Image (spheres, rainbow, N blue to C red):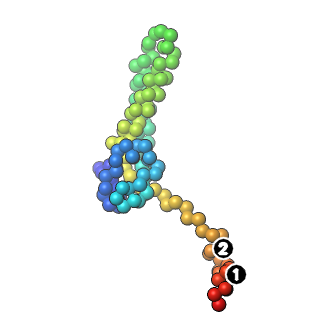
Amino acid sequence: MAVRICPHCRTEICASDSAARSNDIVCPKCETRLEVASGSRTIASLAGLAAGAVAWKLSSNGTGDLAGVLPTLYAFLAFGVVSPLVLMFTANLRNAPALPVLLPADSSAPAGHDAGGHGAHH
Ligand SMILES: [Zn+2]
């Protein structure tokens, strides 16, 4: 399974780019806007949650002043580390939705064509 490959020109996208800019990656070769497919994000998020749960479990038996805080901290750190790592290795790229094109309000109305400044040339 090809990961982090531009669907247009088969250029490999840098792993850190795919994790850091998963909604708005621009292919370095053909400059197509890409994004990480949602399936890959789900996998990465689930893996991160699993890592967080394991970290919580491992640290929840601790004693001491910070025993109530450390499991949360470790779970948070585990999620923050594992999730982007998994995303780097599993990310499939797809075309990002096209940016909305802003058209003048009257550009599609046939009547607007005659009513505009077009008549000055006649
Ligand atoms: Zn490309």
Q: Is residue 43 above or below residue 92?
A: above
Residue in the image at 42% along x and 21% along y = 57
Query: Is the CB of mark 1 within 8 Å of ligand 1?
Result: no
For label 1, the residue is 115
Residue in the image at 66% along x and 73% along y = 106
The local secondary structure at tag 2 comes to loop
Asked if one can make out residue 43 in the rendered structure from this viewpoint, the answer is no
Looking at the figure, which quarter contains the C terminus?
Answer: bottom right
Task: Determine whether, in the image, residue 72 is placed left or right of residue 7.
Answer: right
Residue projecting furthest to the top: 64
The local secondary structure at tag 1 comes to helix
Task: Determine whether, in the image, residue 32 is placed left or right of residue 111.
Answer: left
Q: How far apart are marks 1 and 2 (CA)?
A: 10 Å
The image shows residue 29 at horizontal and vertical percentages of 34, 59
Residue in the image at 37% along x and 43% along y = 16
The image shows residue 121 at horizontal and vertical percentages of 63, 87
Residue type beneath disc 2: Asp
Task: Determine whether, in the image, residue 113 is placed left or right of residue 52.
Answer: right
- Tell me if label 1 and label 2 are in contact, CB under 8 Å: yes
The image shows residue 83 at horizontal and vertical percentages of 41, 36
Residue type beneath disc 1: Ala
Residue 106: which disc? 2
Q: Quadrant of residue 75?
A: top left
Label 1 crowd (10 A; few <14 / some 14-19 / many >=20): few
Indicate which disc, 1 or 2, sits on the residue closer to the N terminus.
Answer: 2
The image shows residue 11 at horizontal and vertical percentages of 31, 56
Which of the pair 61/68 is nearer the observer?
68
